[in-house]
């Protein structure tokens, strides 16, 4: 497996079940993300794309969004050395400007500092929605077509170059935790031929063993790509 995508679902439900606060649930979700990064490195996965916060999530209570903001800042301040020490490149996709200038600045700085790393490309989707991504791509294509920068007739390769993920291969597999069975507007174009795996665990319960089981399941499937 070269590219694994993960929908990290179940932080709040896990916290409720454990009689913990939402903050503690998301805090454990951050720790699960770190385990996933370490496991991906150990398993030689080159691309790991994780759905952290959707464009629809902006409708959640302000208090919850503030919790997420605090955790993002904490992660960028305290865990960035792990990415740098392990030569992990960070990319953040989506419309995450609403989290505030301080987070945007920290993200852009860490993206620049890790730009030349290639052991693992870690993509975090924040404020991301696949439909918005596709609409934005179409609008840019229209503009470039009018300016004669691209052919009037486009193909899937040209279209893919206008997406946030233009510099990476499509995911081989997408995994969703949280006992839900939908894609929730995540990488809809890119997941056209990805294998789908839905897990009965909540995201804070994700471990290296979980990833190893995912890889085993993936390796036992036959991918035909429509043939």
Image: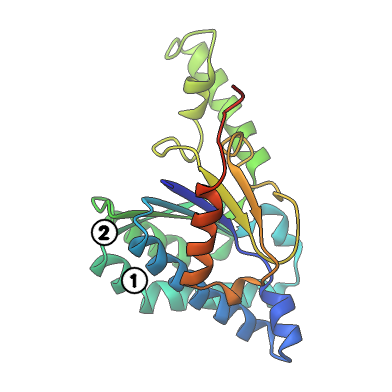
The quadrant where residue 153 appears: top right
Q: Residues within 10 Å of mark 2 (few under 14, many from 20)?
A: some
Q: Residue at x 45, y 79 (%)?
A: 74
Q: Residue at x 67, y 39 (%)?
A: 131
Left or right placement of residue 160 versus residue 68 in this view: left
Q: Let me know if residue 155 appears in the view.
A: yes
Q: Is residue 15 above or below residue 194?
A: below
Q: Quadrant of residue 87?
A: bottom left
Nearer to us in this view, 23 or 37: 37
The picture places residue 151, in percent across and down from the top left corner, at: 47, 9
Residue 94, visible in the rendered structure? no
Q: Using a 10 Å C-alpha cutoff, classify the residue at mark 1 as few (fewer than 14 neighbours), some (14 to 19) or many (20 or more).
A: some
Cα distance, mark 2 to mark 1?
A: 10 Å
Q: Position of residue 99 (x, y in %)?
A: 56, 64
Q: Which mark is residue 80?
A: 1
Residue at image mark 2? 113
């Amino acid at each position: 497996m070269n590219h694994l995508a993960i929908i990290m679902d179940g932080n709040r439900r896990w916290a409720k079940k454990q009689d913990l606060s939402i903050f503690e649930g998301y805090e454990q979700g951050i720790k699960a993300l770190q385990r996933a990064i370490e496991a991906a490195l150990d398993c030689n996965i080159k691309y790991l794309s994780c759905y952290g916060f959707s464009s629809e999530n902006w409708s959640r209570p302000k208090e919850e969004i503030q919790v997420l903001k605090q955790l993002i800042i904490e992660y960028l301040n305290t865990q960035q050395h792990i990415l740098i020490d392990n030569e992990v490149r960070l990319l953040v996709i989506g419309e995450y400007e609403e989290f505030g200038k301080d987070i945007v600045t920290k993200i852009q700085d860490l993206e620049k500092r890790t730009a030349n790393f290639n052991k693992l490309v870690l993509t975090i989707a924040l404020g991301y929605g696949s439909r918005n991504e596709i609409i934005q791509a179409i609008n840019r294509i229209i503009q470039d077509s009018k300016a004669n920068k691209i052919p009037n007739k486009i193909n899937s390769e040209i279209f893919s170059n206008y997406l946030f993920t233009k510099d990476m291969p499509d995911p081989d597999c997408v995994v969703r935790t949280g006992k839900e069975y939908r894609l929730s507007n995540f990488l809809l174009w890119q997941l056209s031929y990805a294998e789908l795996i839905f897990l009965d665990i909540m995201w804070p319960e994700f471990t290296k063993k979980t990833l190893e089981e995912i890889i085993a399941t993936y390796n036992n499937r036959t991918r035909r790509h429509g043939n």
